[in-house]
């Protein structure tokens, strides 16, 4: 059992080019990297090959760090997740001063809690009808919370992402672009530097702009 726990704690989730989870792998040398909620590196994959990439300038002698968890969560949730899965508390500067928590949970509390519950209830649809139901739910919440939740609220942001995915699967390209464009500033705020999640989002929005014959805008987006 102890060996099983060691393996579980040191596994990496393998993702594809669009940062979608496709499997799990064990990479012993990369397991030596410590965690930070504000890491200077990120792990990406080319097939099953693991690559370590910097997301910002690294000073001489600075420790290389990665985030073991989804860094979009507020400090309290990150701490709970780390303790539950990895049995430690993080004391990185981002956790100590709870930087960005106010922006992540901005807006009316009862509104973002409703959106949070709705996001957690979404399961990946398998039919057009299910995608239509997801989109209708997203549209309803986004409309009712207009002026109550800024797009920088992390649950509002996840709802926008969900609406964008639904529109793409329903081939509603113009509406998908509308929702996707609203995510770009929050992504820049929460995934600064050369973070691959922001790069993927810029690529998706750029492709949508291109599909709408918005060539100058698409070029500008993809150049970022």
Image (cartoon, grey):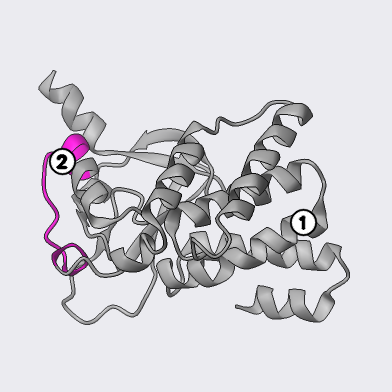
Left or right position of 177 against 163: right
Mark 2–mark 1 distance (CA, rounded to whole Å): 40 Å
Q: Nearer the viewer, mark 2 or mark 1?
A: 1
Question: Can you give x and y, in whole percent of width and height, for residue 136 in the image?
Answer: 70, 40
Question: Can you give x and y, in whole percent of width and height, for residue 82 in the image?
Answer: 20, 44
Residue 10 lies within the magenta run: no
Q: Is residue 83 above or below residue 66?
A: above
Question: Can you give x and y, in whole percent of width and height, for residue 162 in the image?
Answer: 60, 46
Q: Is residue 36 above or below residue 166?
A: below
- Residue 6 numbered tag: none
Q: Is residue 197 above or below residue 218?
A: above
Q: Principal SS element in the magenta part? A: helix
Question: Can you give x and y, in whole percent of width and height, for residue 116 in the image?
Answer: 44, 44
Q: Residue furthest right?
A: 213
Left or right position of 5 against 155: left
Image: magenta residue range? 82-96
Q: What residue sits 46% from the left and 36% below the top?
A: 120
Q: What residue sits 73% from the left and 55% below the top?
A: 176
Q: What residue sits 39% from the left and 70% below the top?
A: 55
The total number of labels drawn is 2
Instruction: Quickly name the residue at label 2.
Output: 83
- Residue 175 numbered tag: 1
Answer yes or no: is residue 204 visible. Answer: no
Residue 87 lies within the magenta run: yes
Left or right position of 92 against 8: left
Q: What residue sits 45% from the left and 41% below the top?
A: 14
Q: Is residue 124 above or below residue 166?
A: above
Quadrant where the N terminus sits is top left
* Image quarter of residue 99: bottom left
Binning the other alpha carbons within 10 Å of mark 2 as few (below 14), some (14 to 19) or many (20 upward) gives few
């Amino acid at each position: 059992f102890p060996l099983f726990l060691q393996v579980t704690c040191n596994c990496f989730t393998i993702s594809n080019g669009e940062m979608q989870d496709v499997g799990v792998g064990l990479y012993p040398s990369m397991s030596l990297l410590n965690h930070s909620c504000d890491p200077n590196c990120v792990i990406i994959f080319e097939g099953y090959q693991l690559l370590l990439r910097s997301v910002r300038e690294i000073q001489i002698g600075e420790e290389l760090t990665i985030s073991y968890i989804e860094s979009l969560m507020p400090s309290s949730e990150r701490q709970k997740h780390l303790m539950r899965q990895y049995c430690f508390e993080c004391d990185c500067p981002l956790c100590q001063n709870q930087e960005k928590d106010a922006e992540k949970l901005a807006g009316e509390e009862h509104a973002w809690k409703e959106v949070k519950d709705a996001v957690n209830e979404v399961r990946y649809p398998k039919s057009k009808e299910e995608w239509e139901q997801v989109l209708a739910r997203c549209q309803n919440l986004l409309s009712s919370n207009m002026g109550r939740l800024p797009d920088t609220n992390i649950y509002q942001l996840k709802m926008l992402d969900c609406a964008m995915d639904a529109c793409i699967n329903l081939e509603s390209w113009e509406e998908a672009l509308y929702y996707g464009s609203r995510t770009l500033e929050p992504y820049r705020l929460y995934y600064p530097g050369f973070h691959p999640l922001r790069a993927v989002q810029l690529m998706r929005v750029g492709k949508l702009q291109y599909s709408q014959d918005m060539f100058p805008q698409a070029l500008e987006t993809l150049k970022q």
